[in-house]
Image: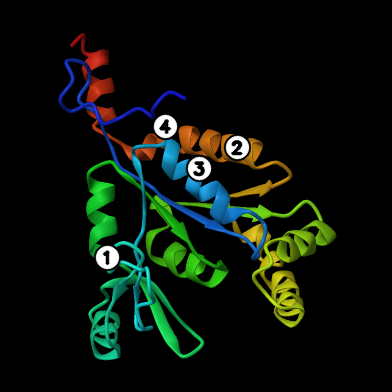
Amino acid sequence: MSQPLQNQTNSPGPRIHRRGLMLVMSSPSGAGKTTISRQLLATDSNLRMSVSVTTRPQRPGETDGVDYHFIDKTRFDAMVADRQLLEYAAVFSNFYGTPRAPVEEALRQGRDVLFDLDWQGTQQIAEIAREDLVSVFILPPSGNELERRLRTRAQDSAEVIAQRMAKAADEVSHWAEYDYVIVNVDVETSVRHVQAVMAAERLKRRRQIGLSEFVKGLLHGA
């Protein structure tokens, strides 16, 4: 697959710098979001995964700064107070959040950032950075297929699967709040659909910094 159009500030052509975007993907557990995300990251060199901060203990096999930034509650509270987080939430007595600074720096450099968030986190980002946000909701092809996928993973008990199915109904109810909705019947097709979304969003007029000056030059014969 061809790589996305990069910033053109060092090229002999028009000096147009593209601002990066925030690609947020949400779905109920088992809909295929993680698999799609991994394929996107593997095939797109301009896309990077956002690394969250968390107060939960580091687990065996996890790497600080790669899986999460592991911090204590005092540091987390300070980041919230200083507005250093784009979004944050409490999950089972642990706290998670998205650091603002590395995301904003990536966007300035024309790099795109991928987020794995629920609808609440997506709403928080939409409130403060709507122009940079591209949100995609991944749906399963059916409730029966979603349950089958959860059982096939063989990671959870029947009780946990029932809880995930109940939670899925609440998550799916927020589908209309997203820019794009993809029914994940086939992973490869779904990946291509997200890639098409990215290709179009990267060409949005508002993300092409310097475009107005370039057009003025054209109109004046430059």
* Residue identifier under label 2: 193
Q: Crowding at label 2, few (<14), some or many (≥20) Cα neighbours within 10 Å?
A: some
- Judged by depth in the image, the label closer to the viewer, 4 or 3, is 3
- Judged by depth in the image, the label closer to the viewer, 4 or 1, is 1
Q: Nearest the camera: 31 or 62?
A: 62
First along the sequence among labels 4 and 3: 3
* Residue identifier under label 1: 65
Q: CA distance from mark 4 to mark 1?
A: 31 Å
Image coordinates for residue 182, horizontal then vertical, percent: 66, 47
In contact (CB < 8 Å): disc 4 and disc 1: no
Going by the numbered disc 1, the residue's amino acid type is: Gly
Q: CA distance from mark 3 to mark 1?
A: 21 Å
Find numbered disc 3 in the image and state the secondary structure of the residue it sits on. Answer: helix
Going by the numbered disc 3, the residue's amino acid type is: Gln
* Residue identifier under label 3: 39
Q: Classify residue 59 as left or right of residue 8.
A: right
**Is 8 above or below relative to 131?**
above
Find numbered disc 1 in the image and state the secondary structure of the residue it sits on. Answer: loop
For the point 37% across and 68% down, which residue is it? 61
Q: Residue furthest right?
A: 144
Q: Nearest the camera: 30 or 61?
A: 61
Find numbered disc 4 in the image and state the secondary structure of the residue it sits on. Answer: loop
Going by the numbered disc 4, the residue's amino acid type is: Leu
- Judged by depth in the image, the label closer to the viewer, 2 or 1, is 1
